[in-house]
Image (cartoon, rainbow, N blue to C red):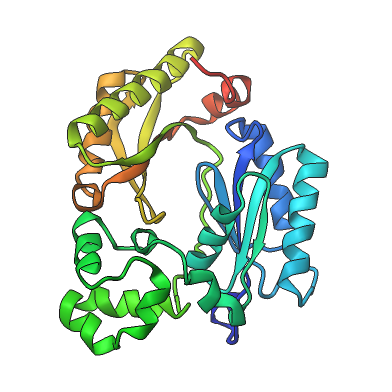
């Protein structure tokens, strides 16, 4: 049984990488092996990992202790600086991780959820874009904590099913499970933005630059890829990934760019905007995979 379904409060650890060679495949593999000493329930991102340590391999009942041990192990064994958030849900753990960056550790216990969310801006609530933020402003709601004073029925009337999600998240209730999935046989590039990006043309410009950088790395090593993965991080910190398999292997930036733009249309960036765009390339043959360690950390 998944620990997320085992009953009681979950213990979710969100690790954000502040510094370290995490784009190097060998280093990332060592990072993955370290985390698996604690749990197999790990969800991966380009610069983060989410762990469900509710029922961890060391049988440690205290989530705070596990979070501290993981952070210490990463620093000692890999030399990486990471920020760590521990909370009863993925949403809260993400917010906790961001609270004390860089090199921070923030713990949100079940009884602390109300106080923790009291001053978190409403736009950090999943599903709240520019339009919804304006609607909340009209209701004089600027922080997530204020939603606990609004009846569930009113939020559903105003926002439909999203209103129910808003209400539950504001109370710290989140059933989003940690979904183990990893892609270590992939190279990637990403671009983050200091403020949410809403212009589709600017997004396409960013994707074009990422495609050129990635394909430059392929061409320098004589490699070709077939799978294109797009990663989008929305302003509410949710992350979406979309993947396409090309009809043939390629090292051409135009082919990668075109595929990434098509994947972009399958996301919610038109309504929500984005704070990060990333492109990953995979689908190498076995012989090419042996070469990845030689250039995984290389930048154009």
Please, is residue 39 above or below residue 161 in the view?
above
What residue is at 23 percent from the left and 54 percent from the top?
Answer: 130
- Looking at the image, residue 258 sits to the left or right of residue 295; the answer is left
Viewer-closest of 42 and 99: 99
What residue is at 48 percent from the left and 10 percent from the top?
Answer: 220
Q: Residue 136 at what x, y percent from top left?
A: 24, 68
Viewer-closest of 180 and 101: 101
Q: So how many labels did they put on this image?
A: 0
Please, is residue 226 above or below residue 224 in the view?
below
Q: Quadrant of residue 258?
A: top left
Residue at the outermost front position: 140
Viewer-closest of 131 and 33: 131
Q: Quadrant of residue 237?
A: bottom left
Please, is residue 181 above or below residue 228 in the view?
below
Residue at the outermost top position: 220
Q: Residue 89 at what x, y percent from top left?
A: 52, 71
Tell me if residue 57 can be seen: no
What residue is at 51 percent from the left and 60 percent from the top?
Answer: 95
Q: Residue 71 at what x, y percent from top left?
A: 74, 52
What residue is at 78 percent from the left and 67 percent from the top?
Answer: 65
Viewer-closest of 63 and 42: 63
Q: Quadrant of the N terminus?
A: bottom right
Tell me if residue 167 can be seen: yes
Q: Quadrant of residue 96?
A: bottom right
Residue at the outermost right position: 76
Q: Residue 12 at what x, y percent from top left?
A: 60, 67
- Looking at the image, residue 43 sits to the left or right of residue 251; the answer is right
Please, is residue 189 above or below residue 63 in the view?
above
């Amino acid at each position: 049984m998944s620990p997320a379904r085992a009953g009681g409060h979950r213990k979710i650890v969100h690790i954000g990488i502040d510094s370290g060679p995490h784009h190097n495949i060998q280093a990332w593999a060592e990072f993955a092996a370290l985390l698996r000493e604690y749990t197999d329930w790990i969800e991966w991102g380009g610069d983060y990992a989410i762990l469900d340590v509710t029922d961890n391999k060391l049988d440690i009942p205290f989530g705070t202790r596990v979070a501290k041990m993981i952070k210490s192990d990463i620093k000692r064994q890999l030399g990486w600086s990471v920020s760590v958030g521990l909370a009863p849900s993925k949403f809260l753990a993400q917010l906790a991780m961001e609270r004390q960056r860089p090199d921070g550790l923030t713990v949100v216990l079940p009884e602390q959820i109300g106080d923790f969310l009291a001053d978190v801006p409403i736009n950090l609530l999943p599903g709240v874009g520019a339009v919804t933020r304006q609607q909340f402003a009209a209701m004089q709601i600027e922080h997530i904590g204020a939603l606990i004073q609004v009846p569930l029925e009113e939020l559903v009337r105003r926002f439909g099913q999203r209103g129910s999600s808003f209400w539950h998240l504001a109370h710290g209730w989140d059933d989003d499970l940690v979904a183990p999935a990893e892609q270590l046989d992939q190279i990637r590039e990403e671009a983050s933005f200091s403020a949410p990006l809403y212009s589709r043309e600017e997004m396409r410009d960013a994707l074009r630059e990422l495609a050129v950088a990635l394909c430059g790395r392929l061409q320098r090593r004589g490699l070709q890829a077939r799978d294109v993965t797009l990663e989008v991080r929305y302003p509410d910190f949710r992350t979406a990934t979309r993947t396409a398999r090309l009809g043939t292997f390629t090292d051409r930036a135009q082919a990668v760019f075109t595929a990434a733009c098509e994947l972009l249309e399958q996301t919610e960036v038109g309504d929500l905007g984005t704070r990060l765009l990333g492109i990953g390339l995979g689908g190498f043959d076995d012989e090419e995979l042996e070469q990845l360690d030689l250039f995984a950390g290389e930048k154009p």
